[in-house]
Image: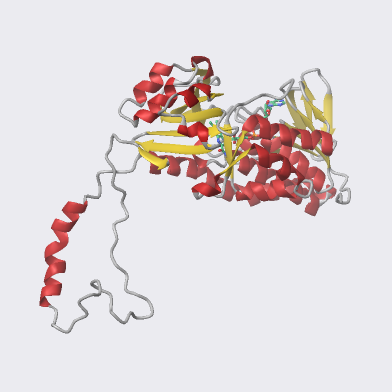
Amino acid sequence: MSAPKTGIKVIVVGAGFGGLCAAIECQRQGHDVEIYENFPQLKVLGDIISFGANAGRIFYRWGDGEVVRRLKPLTIDLKGYGFRIHKYDTGELHKVIFDYARDDLGIPIHLDNPVTEYFEDENHAGVVLKNGKRVTGDVVIGADGVRSKARELVLGYFDKPKSSGYAVWRAWFPASEMAKDPRTKEFCEHGDTFNGWIGQDVHFLFSTIKGGKNCSWVLTHKDDHDIDESWSFPGKIEDVKAVLKDWDPLCTAIIEKTPPSALVDWKLVYRDPLPKWISKHGRIALLGDSAHPFLPTSAQGATQSMEDGVTMAVCLKRAGKGNVPAAVKTYQDLRYERVGKVQKTGETTRDLWHKTDWEKFDAEKHAEDNFADVFKAHVDAPADAEAAAPLGMSANPPPSPPKRKQDNSVQRKKKTPLPLID
Ligand SMILES: Cc1cc2nc3c(=O)[nH]c(=O)nc-3n(C[C@H](O)[C@H](O)[C@H](O)COP(=O)(O)OP(=O)(O)OC[C@H]3O[C@@H](n4cnc5c(N)ncnc54)[C@H](O)[C@@H]3O)c2cc1C
């Protein structure tokens, strides 16, 4: 059942996950919405993407579970790996959401219509299209991605992206060669798989998809190139092999099967958190990557852009047509802190994987260093002491056992990458 109409007209710029979700949610909450998108047709992105439960529950509300039913056959169910996350091919997933918005809900999506300018006053906001047409509404959502034009208007200056110090090589290709090689065929024989290796300053994630018929990998590594606005280039297989020189030979076996034309060298750009996401009159708001670019290691960029859209739609509904600027300010306040914290996980997860001191814990050294004190306590103990209980524990344990000192550091040789999941 559709929500009562609010009379609020929302213009969304960009039909990525953020823009599509914002439009779908705005319509769910009773607003009139349309999308303007630069690209002339759907792009095949050929990449995998993870969505957490926070995105799953958004998808689930669309069409009473119908959208999830359409997505399921495209996913790798990772529950068997201990994750409650699904991975999708971004291009196919994006198409399911795009088709749901356009065909099921009838949301107008104007492709091949780049927005060149934004404008607003106290009462309205709008965009100017490349063809010169002006479109006016109550609020504009700038979901125009990491190279956002809307951001310039909101900030009042051009915020240059900076290098994150890392880049990813990415590839997606048929797994036929993989299936012929005895070293790699196991990845193709048991349906979809998800595999990872981590090591000093590098991690390598590899998936077989489509029942083992296609494969995709992403290798994140150090890269200090100074980049400008263009950050995607063809890659060289020799460069990838050089980075993986001392790694598990299985990684190189996978890399060798990659057709050179499938390899992309993608520089990971970053921006510091923006001081604000909304314009002077509170009628133009940034959403998704335009407000907060994410590093892939958070695996939350698309999901957070979806949460933005849900929040904006609710704020507009609750505030009503007469209070749009206050609704937009509320959206920013409700989202800003949470997004900032999740954004940080892009760096903390990466550093956890890349900077772990594998040499830290040495069991032999630990035993040698600590033996004397612990042994002495047992030798000195009265004969009737509870010999079988570990030190600090009683044979008749108290309600809460005393805390014991633990060393949780991981032990691993520096040069040998650790398989995340076999
Ligand atoms: C290698 C990699 C792996 C990732 N893995 C994950 C993951 O596992 N999980 C996850 O949640 N996220 C992941 N992300 C991040 C995620 O892809 C992004 O955060 C998300 O797609 C951002 O969506 P968006 O809608 O904000 O922007 P975009 O998807 O960039 O969409 C912006 C849209 O705006 C359009 N546009 C731009 N300018 C204009 C204009 N002037 N006029 C009209 N239209 C315009 C563009 O054409 C585009 O379609 C990953 C990213 C990378 C690079």
Task: Say which of 164 and 333 sits in front.
Answer: 164
Q: Could you tell me which quadrant the C terminus lies in?
A: top left
Image check: 305 left or right of 242? right
In percent of width and height, residue 212 lies at 55, 32
Residue at 74% across / 43% down in the picture? Answer: 67
Residue 352 sits above or below residue 39 on the image: below
Q: Position of residue 158 (x, y in %)?
A: 59, 27
- Is residue 165 visible from the viewing direction of this image? no
Choose between 133 and 266: the one closer to the eye. Answer: 266
Q: Residue furthest bottom?
A: 384
Quarter, ligand 1 = top right
Tell me: residue 320, above or below residue 259.
below
Q: Is residue 383 visible?
A: yes
Frontmost residue, 91 versus 14? 91
On screen, residue 61 above or below 103: below
Kindly identify the residue that appears in the image at 40 percent across and 29 percent down. Answer: 183
Count of numbered tags: 0
Residue at image location 55% in from the left, 19% down from the top: 230
Q: For this rendering, which residue is in front, 136 or 350?
A: 350
Q: Position of residue 233 (x, y in %)?
A: 51, 17
Tell me where residue 373 sits by quadrant: bottom left
The colour scheme used here is secondary structure
Residue 192 in the image, given as x and y percentages of width and height: 55, 37
Is 200 above or below relative to 308?
above
